Amino acid sequence: MSETLLCFKNVSKSYYGNTVLSDICFEVSAGEIHALIGENGAGKSTLMNILFGMSVIHSTGGYEGDVIIDGKKTFIKTPFEALDAGVGMVHQEFMLIPGFTITENIKLNREITTPNIASRVLGKRLETLDMVKMDADARKALDTLSMDIEEFTLVEGLPVGHKQFIEIAREIDKTGIKILVFDEPTAVLTESEAQNLLAAMRRLAQTGIGILFISHRLDEIIDVADRVTVLRDGQLVKTMNTKDTDVVEIAQLMIGREVTITPVQTDAKKISDEVMLSVKDLHVGMPGEMVRGIDLEVRRGEIVGIGGLAGQGKLGIANGIMGTYPSTGEVVFNGNPLALNDPRATLASGIAFVSEDRKGVGLLLNESIELNIAFTAMQVNGHFLSSLAGWNLRNDREIRENAERMIKDLDIRCSSSLQSTGSLSGGNQQKVCVARALTQKPQFLFVSEPTRGIDIGAKKLILDLLLRLSEEYGMTIVMTSSELAELRSICNRIVIICDGRVEGILPPDASDAEFGLMMSGSRGLTKNADLEPVH
């Protein structure tokens, strides 16, 4: 049996009484590729924060359980201590300096120097870089990855795949690396680049390095990993050999919690055959959420869910149509072409938007609740303004009356409508965002991650509100969410986005396995007869 390099033993973590990890136990052996998988929010990031000693862990009371590295119980307090313990990480976001050469990036903060006359008098900081030795080390790391590129090449302008390999080369050049964590390393790569990277992972494992491979791509896990550990809602579901499982079982384990589905087809629910929003060949340049050409139709009166894993483009759709990020394509709303890249015109057309970034985009945190609720309607539609001698003056009485009505209807917990919005809890800030959108009296509502970071009671109120807006007022809603259970609870149909494109459309009562396979882009890999094509 191979030597155990990393062991998580009964690791638990809570934030302010909310348990996010509970008794996690699994091991990574020398020469093993061990996959770690789970939905967004399953606990993967928290576990890695513990392994790397991130301050967010230690500033919130630490953790319970043991992290054992190379047979020794450790308590890592900083990423530097993790490196000293032999743990490295390859991130999906590049941390390279474009104006430096490959060698300079690989050896950054670990430069090899030689003394000179000035350094002998004035100190080590003036020593000369030994580029011959540094280039030799860089060349060795690049050769390990079978990367045929000169080590003195500038990083600026290199393809994405090359940059990812340079990140890996930097890690394996570090002395004493025993465990290497790959965090979604293929998320930004083409298919051929991803295959090259997986081959490089196999070669690294053959040298005795233990690899912890975090990925949402089930086909890659089956292809390259020896074992897979599935987390769900902060708990360990199962660790198993990949040769004894398949993408269907992994998908079911990843998604398969109990989901209470509220029927959405009620007598009050009227969905027209009329297409209210038509999207054709939409491309959106939202960093980390690129949309690469989607077609979509939304009928009047329905609630359409948009789901998918992180970084696959689901958030880019609403942001592109609303003009938050540059976009191209054709969008028709209510039979009229909608001008892209013009947020004011889009809002004026009768479309409202509750952004996923409530602090950066959604709210004026230093202003009052009542001004936040009225702001967009006032700026775009001219509401709450009174004309006097050619001047538009703000009607504070109407603003306050509207805010007090919204505070009551949405149960916004505050001392008064004059309270600073930044002093509210996350859930109440989210309700203010919804109140602002509703104040525009829109026909159509985009709402992105409406329940992110809020408690279960606030989640239920917001979901119930969206359902009521659709059923009682006929509002058409497109809801983007990382929470599949919430999409299934109120949506008429759910569009799954993968790699910036529509992977398929499912009814809310489709199987857990089909959702999991579609979200991971692995649906075409199975021959399971129970999974029929989606039209």
Image (spheres, rainbow, N blue to C red):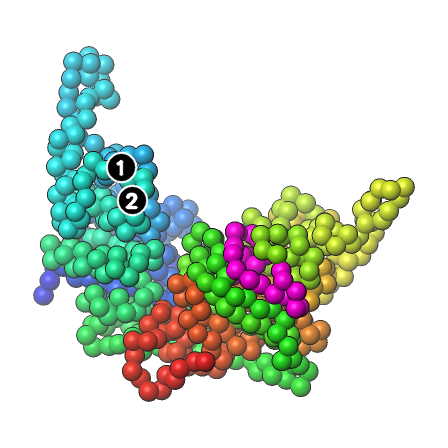
Residue under label 1: 154
Percent of width and height locating residue 35: 26, 64
Which residue is rendered at x = 50% and y = 74% of the image?
Answer: 494
Q: Distance between the residues labelled 2 and 1?
A: 8 Å
Are the residues tagged 2 and 1 within 8 Å (C-beta)? yes
Q: Quadrant of residue 240?
A: bottom left
Residue under label 2: 158
Taking depth in this image into account, of 523 and 7 the one nearest to the observer is: 523
Which residue is rendered at x = 9% and y = 65% of the image?
Answer: 1
Magenta part of the chain: 317-338
Percent of width and height locating residue 329: 52, 60
Which residue is rendered at x = 31% and y = 84% of the image?
Answer: 528
Side of 177 where 293 appears, left or right: right
Side of 387 where 411 appears, left or right: left
Taking depth in this image into account, of 273 and 370 the one nearest to the observer is: 273
- Depicted 84 relative to depicted 131: above or below: below
